[in-house]
Image (cartoon, rainbow, N blue to C red):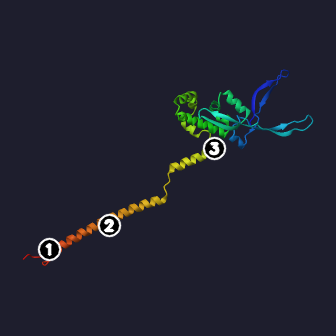
Amino acid sequence: MSMKLESGKKDEVTGEVLPIQNVPIPVFYPKEHDQHIWGGEGVVQGFQVRAKYRRRVPHFWVPILKRSVVYSEILDKYMSVIVTDRTINLINSNYGFDHYLLKTPACDLKSLLALGIKRKLLQELENGCQIYSDRPEKQEVILKKYQGYLATYTPEEIKWYGYSFYQACEMLQEQLEAEKKTVPLKHVYRAKLIENLKAANLEKSEQSVADIGSSESAASWLQKLNPFGKKHET
């Protein structure tokens, strides 16, 4: 755990300067956190003194979770998700669910669910909000309202935004395999065999033509030399 030292505090009597230590509280995020939107909250482990003359006991402070319905104006969709009170407050303070996700950086959203929804929002804005293609006026209003968030990202960043390390590795592996375009060896060998057969048939046909020509010339010379080869008219 890193320790941050801030400006010291000076004792008015002795004049001694004492450093002020600001140690961040460790916050844990269980795997279920990736399926919810907690608004930055997590599980805090510590000790609690439950009585004056008793020893402290270990205690976990867990966020209070509740299921709520949020609306995405860009996707034109209602979603039922598990959130905390802080998530609801952040949505209200940012004047909407889409504004909250688009304004908040990935390090504060943390949840893979929130990052995945944000990636879909950015992709939809990049494609011009085709969901509202049948309502051009509404489409223009939505683009004008949220288009400014695209200036922070490049198309390549939007493509890879919000994936975990393992998800990104799987996507990269699929992309590399698609680029290879591996051809089965049976197709290669079959194509070579067809070419060899064609070449062999061509050579055979040329040889047969040459043989026929040589046989005809030999027969004509034999007829010329043979006195009984021609029929005399009477």
| Mark 1 neighbour density, 10 Å: few (under 14) some (14–19) many (20 or more) | few
Measured as percent of width and height from the top left, residue 30 is found at 73, 42
> 92 and 22: which one is in front?
92
| Mark 2 neighbour density, 10 Å: few (under 14) some (14–19) many (20 or more) | few
- Position of 189 with respect to 205 (left or right) is right
> Circle 3 sits on which residue?
165
Q: CA distance from mark 3 to mark 1?
A: 91 Å
Q: Earlier in the sequence, mark 3 or mark 1?
A: 3
Measured as percent of width and height from the top left, residue 116 is found at 62, 39
Image point (56%, 48%), residue name:
174
Find numbered disc 3 in the image and state the secondary structure of the residue it sits on.
helix
Give the amino acid type for the residue marked by disc 3 in the picture.
Answer: Phe
> Circle 1 sits on which residue?
224
Q: Is residue 165 above or below residue 94?
A: below
- Position of 4 with respect to 196 (left or right) is right
Contact between marks 2 and 1 (CB within 8 A): the answer is no
Image point (78%, 28%), residue name:
20
Q: Earlier in the sequence, mark 2 or mark 1?
A: 2
Image point (46%, 59%), residue name:
187
Measured as percent of width and height from the top left, residue 51 is found at 90, 35
Q: Quadrant of residue 204?
A: bottom left
Q: Is residue 147 above or below residue 176?
A: above
Measured as percent of width and height from the top left, residue 36 is found at 69, 39
Q: Earlier in the sequence, mark 3 or mark 2?
A: 3
Q: CA distance from mark 2 to mark 1?
A: 31 Å
Give the amino acid type for the residue marked by disc 2 in the picture.
Answer: Lys
Q: Which mark is residue 204?
A: 2
